């Protein structure tokens, strides 16, 4: 995992059927992730997007 990837803990995730999910984007700040989620929700109203904290897993 690169240093840059360690800094982006907030993820916007699209929820799919059968308990699947797709990470759409990662952000450093929660407010940036919330803004992107609102943008996606306005442009794709029939999809479900959530913002979640995804900490890095250290080996």
Image (spheres, grey):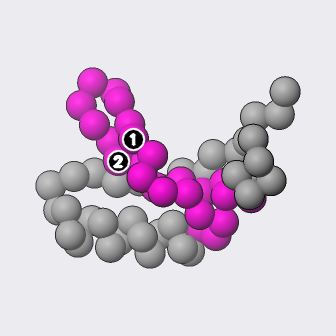
Q: Which residue is drawn at 35% across and 47% down?
A: 14
Magenta-drawn segment: 7-30
Nearest the viewer among 18 and 1 is 1
Say above or below: 20 vs 4: above
Is residue 26 a member of the stretch shown in magenta?
yes
Q: Residues within 10 Å of mark 1 (few under 14, many from 20)?
A: few
Q: Is the stretch drawn in magenta largely helix, strand or loop?
A: strand
Q: Position of residue 55 (x, y in %)?
A: 71, 45
Q: How crowded is mark 2: few (under 14 residues within 10 Å), some or many (20 or more)?
A: some
Q: Where is residue 46 in the image (x, y as percent from the top left)?
A: 15, 55
Q: Which residue is drawn at 54% across and 73% down?
A: 32
Name the disc covering residue 14, or none: 2
Q: Position of residue 3 (x, y in %)?
A: 80, 53
Say above or below: 7 vs 13: below
Looking at the rendered image, the quarter that the N terminus falls into is: top right
Name the disc covering residue 41, or none: none
Does residue 8 appear to the left or right of 17 in the view shown? Answer: right
**Most extreme residue toward the right, as rendered?**
59
Say above or below: 33 vs 51: below
Q: Where is residue 10 in the image (x, y as percent from the top left)?
A: 60, 57
Instruction: For marks 1 and 2, give the CA distance.
Output: 5 Å
Q: Which residue is drawn at 35% across and 30% down?
A: 20
Tag 1 residue? 22
Quarter assignment of residue 42: bottom left
Does residue 4 appear to the left or right of 13 in the view shown? Answer: right
Report if the CB atoms under discs 1 and 2 are less than 8 Å apart: yes
């Amino acid at each position: 995992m690169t240093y840059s990837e360690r800094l982006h803990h907030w993820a916007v995730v699209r929820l799919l059927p059968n308990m699947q999910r797709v990470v759409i984007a990662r952000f450093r700040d929660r407010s940036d992730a919330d803004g992107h989620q609102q943008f996606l929700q306005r442009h794709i109203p029939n999809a479900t997007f959530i913002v979640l904290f995804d900490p890095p897993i250290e080996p």
